[in-house]
Structure formats: structure tokens, C-alpha cells
Amino acid sequence: MRRVRHDSTQSDTVTRDRLAVIPLISLVLFLITSAFAPLNRIGEVILDIVLCVALGAAAVELSARRAMRWPAIFLAVPTAFVLLLSTFHPARPLVTANWALVTIAFGFISANLFLYLGRPGRITNGRLYGSVSLYLMIATVFYGLFNLLETLNLASFRVNSLPAGSAVSKHSLLYFSLVTLTTLGYGDIVPLTQQARVFAAVESVTGVLYIAITVARLVAAYKATDRDED
């Protein structure tokens, strides 16, 4: 009986590890796409489609937990629909709704993944994949938020190499989100409005705290596992 339970638990762990790597791959693909997609309308359409894939992969991982299955579906499906609709019909109200939903969806998934990774238990490959995915997901949350601010107010950000008042591309805002989260802060893109400055500072603090908390959690989980084995 114990043998059957052990095999079942091991099988569940392998399944979760496989599910955890899918969002990580999709988020990395999203970042790579932003590096090579052309800086024009076609490139932004490609970026939105890959973002939709990343959202679906994150929702699938979240739905693997029974309590989160229906919330993940009800949140991901309309968000993906509006995302694709606004991609091909970029009316301002639709684009605004899109970025609001993207921010909420990735924020909800990130919060639940953060709580899940904080649960006691062994350090599996799935947890490590999930930790990296969550870090990239946080950047995606603020990417959606920055796009929302830029949609509501075109003067929220400025690329120093472009004339004042120029629209900031999605590629640039994703780059800005990543360098802000990692506290690199090159200064080639700057927030101008009060809202943009505050949320950029919040992302920077979030990146620092995430690294500190994640390392502490992993060390604590490792010590607890080591004690149990002894």
C-alpha cells in the first residue's frame, strides 16, 4: 500500500514538474520574441499573440490545482479573447480594457503561484521552474500596467532617443519593465507622470524583495527537508 502511494506521489510530482516548465518556456519565448520581432505593427501583433500563449500556459499550470481551476478559466478565457480582439481591432477603449485585463490576469496568477511556492515541502524541479516563472511573470504584470498607463496618457513614458511626445512601443515597455524589476535602471526610458514613477518604483522594490524572500524560502525548505531525512 505504501509502495502504491509512493509511486502515486512521485507520479504527481513529475506531472507538476512538467506543467511548471511550460509557463517558463512560454515566458522566455515571449522575451525572445520581443528581441527579434520588428518594431512595427506586425511585430506588435506577433508579440501580443505570444503573450496570449504565455497567458494560456500560466492559466493551465494554475488550473492544475482544483481550487483554482474555474477561476483560472474564467479569468484567462475573456482576457485572451480581448487581447486578440484588441490586437486586430486596436480601438482605444478595447486596448484599455485589454491591458487592464492582462494586468489583473497575470497579477492573479502571480499571487496564487507565490502562495503555492511558499507552502512547506520538498524543493522539486517544479518549484524551481515556478520560482523563475514567477519572476518573469511579475515583469509581465508591470508590462501590462505600463501599457495601460501609456494608453490612458501618451506622455507617461519617454524614450530619450525619440522626440518628446512620441509613442512608446510595447517592445520598449517590456524592456523597461525588465530593467526596472532587476534594478538595472539604464535611464534610456524614463517615467514622466506621477503614476508611472510610483509604479516603476514599486516594481523595483518588488524585484528586490522577491529575490530576498525566494532565497529565504528555498533555504528554509532545504533545511526542513534535511532535518526530516535525518
Image (spheres, rainbow, N blue to C red):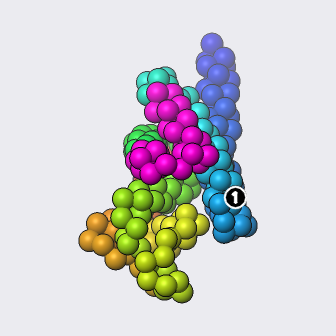
- Look at the image and say whether residue 10 sits in the magenta stretch: no
Which residue is located at x 50 percent, y 70 percent?
Answer: 168
Q: Is residue 11 above or below residue 225?
A: above
Provide the residue span drawn in magenta.
Answer: 72-100
**Res 212 visible:** no
Q: Position of residue 91 (x, y in %)?
A: 49, 48
Q: Is residue 47 left or right of residue 191?
A: right
In the displayed structure, would residue 113 be above or below residue 191? Answer: above
Q: Quadrant of the N terminus?
A: top right
Mark 1 closeness class: few <14, some 14–19, many ≥20 residues within 10 Å = few
Q: Is 92 contained in the magenta span?
A: yes
Q: Position of residue 107 (x, y in %)?
A: 41, 47
Q: Which residue sits at x=56%, y=29%?
A: 64
Residue 89, percent from left and from top:
57, 45
User: Which of the two residues, 161 or 223, is positioned nearer the viewer here?
Assistant: 161
Query: Going by the image, does 192 lie left or right of 186?
Result: left
Query: Mostly what secondary structure, the magenta segment?
Result: helix
Mark 1 secondary-structure assignment: helix
Q: Residue furthest left?
A: 194
Q: Amino acid at mark 1?
A: Ile
Label count reads 1
Q: Is residue 3 visible?
A: yes
Rendered position, 88 above or below 6? below
Query: Looking at the image, which residue is at 36% across and 64% down?
Result: 153
Name the residue carrying label 1: 42
Which residue sits at x=68%, y=27%? 11
Q: Nearer the viewer, residue 185 or 44?
A: 44
- In this view, which residue lies farthest toward the top? 1
State the image coordinates of residue 63 (x, y, percent, origin top left). 53, 29
